[in-house]
Amino acid sequence: MEEDKVLCLPRLSQVAVCGGTHGNELSGVYLVRELLKAKKNVTKQEDEEEEAVPLLMVLSHPLQQCFRYIDTDLNRCFTHASLSGPMSGMTPYEIIRARQLNTMLGPKGSHGAVDLVCDLHNTTANMGLCLITYSDCDWICLHIFRHLQANIPLRYIHFDVSNKESYSLDSVGKHGFAMEIGPQPHGVVRSNIYMAMKAGVQHMLDWVQSFNSGSTFEEGFVDVFTMVKHIDYPRDSETRTITAAIHPQLQDQDFCLLRPGGPLFQTFSGETLRYKGDEPLYPFFINECAYYEKGIALSLARKRQVMCKGIVWPLRYIHNA
Amino acid sequence: MEEDKVLCLPRLSQVAVCGGTHGNELSGVYLVRELLKAKKNVTKQEDEEEEAVPLLMVLSHPLQQCFRYIDTDLNRCFTHASLSGPMSGMTPYEIIRARQLNTMLGPKGSHGAVDLVCDLHNTTANMGLCLITYSDCDWICLHIFRHLQANIPLRYIHFDVSNKESYSLDSVGKHGFAMEIGPQPHGVVRSNIYMAMKAGVQHMLDWVQSFNSGSTFEEGFVDVFTMVKHIDYPRDSETRTITAAIHPQLQDQDFCLLRPGGPLFQTFSGETLRYKGDEPLYPFFINECAYYEKGIALSLARKRQVMCKGIVWPLRYIHNA
């Protein structure tokens, strides 16, 4: 590839890996603990040699294992409004914690923010491993995705939300994504899911090290699933109780094209309810536990091919300067 | 079969089906709601005709969906001690609720208790459908099991605990069992699991109706899994945090014989820990979410064949009297 076709980007001088933003999503909790333990041992052994990738490991929420949150969903507290609004004795715990994390890893949108935030999540949906971002043109995220995808099955999900409106912890970094993996019940750790997440994080760190060493990453296409809409459960008009579950033919079929007329729900009396949209779309987050309260039974995405530009951190220009 | 070989037992004049004893085990919650709705419609249609099986439907816990309990596990509050101890302003909510349920369905151990309690539960373990009881010689429970097993895959689990020490809601009835089904994440309802539970309850009610109509049920053998011991996760000696997950080769292998030396756990650093017992036993409740806090990673059972005696409610003797 010719050099004038690649973008020159600054190196990633600090990377944060966060777990337990949702206290009951346990893969990230135990992985961050394990990485902290390993780092402690390495630091001891190597007598404070320089790390290959300067890495911050963060346990985002003190509630680990039992509960998702205390007052409100921490991973919705990183909007500009939540991070800068007035505080009082009534401020929810998670807003306070979000500001602490923003001080530690941000401030969001500032020059001082860490270069990359990888926030670890689990889902009860059969989504496998996914990176979830707010951008379809963040070349760092897209190249990390391409590198991981060359090694492990993976999907790229894009929520088309502005930086100001972006709400999750990973939005605090200059670049960031949620690493989402399922299926795993919340409050449970499954070895296969833990190991897949561990591999995902290791491949990401390998890529960062390679990028920081001056490697050039060529352009190429990436399949991006852009979220189009959410669908709620059918509910009783008075009590708001759900009256149907995800249809057995749709359950676990994340990223399998849902066509108009396809089965969507099965009511508790046994009736099938069908997808009434007129565009075939890709379902994901099918039957995610935490989304019952958010009114989301599943989300639907459009799949597009995005050209990811070639990038390099021009190490040798600096060395030659 | 000759009549002198069958035991004469009294008819089951009242049956209770309970859901939501654990608020986040949703199959039972939605099934009881659905049965209540259906009963309302039938009652309307049939203008208060007599029911085939007098049926009490109970939503055991007001916390449905989000949480398992408020203060303590309701399904451990039905011991003689909990039901009869002193009360104060500090008494946990679930103890109060247990006493209400004991008044409604019991009192436990009394002549006035309902004849049969079926309490609906879910597990994150891959256990399929199971009946869990405190007896391996409760002929009613064993014959219900045999009838269900003729129609759907099913296992019979026996906790060898005295009536006084028995702790769960189903112990309040003259006969009783938990109907346990998994895998399903807590806080989630999966259509296939809901439908299997619905079928299980329907088959049970069919059997009760048949028994109450004077049918004779012949003797026969039943495979009973009697709980022998629980195994906890490996834990950090100081923090008590778990240091390993269920081994991927054991995960989801409920009721598959675990032999001495078989893989049990995989530590978070990747090491395999093996089963050190010297007796091959059957694992169940492997990686049940709610048992992390109870110190149970899995339970182990011995499989035995139990002779279930033939039974009848001698309807015609009464008719001829």
Image (spheres, coloured by chain):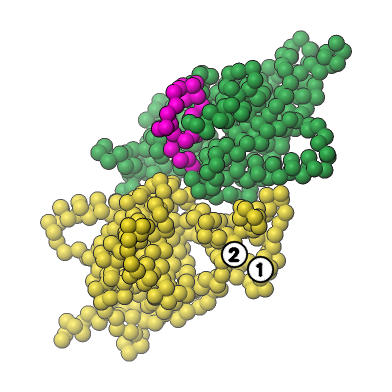
Chain colours: A green, B yellow
- Check if residue A282 falls in the magenta segment: no
Comparing A107 with B262, the one in front is: A107
Question: Which callout, 1 or 2, points at the residue further toward the start of the chain?
Answer: 2
Kindly identify the residue that appears in the image at 68 percent across and 29 percent down. Answer: A15
What secondary structure is found at the residue carrying circle 2?
strand
Q: Residue at x 50, y 48 (%)?
A: A66
| Chain at tag 1 | B
Q: Which residue appears at 47% of the width and 40% of the height?
A: A69
Q: Nearer the viewer, mark 1 or mark 2?
A: 2
Q: Residue at x 73, y 30 (%)?
A: A54
Under tag 1, what secondary structure? loop
Q: Main secondary structure of the magenta part?
A: loop
Percent position (x, y) of residue B95? Answer: 35, 61
Which residue type carries mark 2?
A: Ile
Give the vertical position of B137 relative to B255 (above or below).
Answer: below
Q: Is residue B285 left or right of residue A204?
A: left
- Of residues A251 and A110, the one drawn nearer to the viewer in this rendering: A110
Against A91, is B187 above or below? Answer: below
From the image, tell me which residue sits under label 2: B231
- Per the rendered image, the range of residues in magenta is A68-94
Is residue A73 located in the magenta-colored stretch of the structure? yes
Point out residue A75 in the picture as x, y percentages from the top left corner.
51, 32
Instruction: Give the left or right position of residue B48, taking residue B315 as reference.
Output: left
Residue at the far left: name it.
Answer: B47
The reply to whether residue B121 is visible in this rendering is no
Q: Quadrant of residue A237?
A: top left
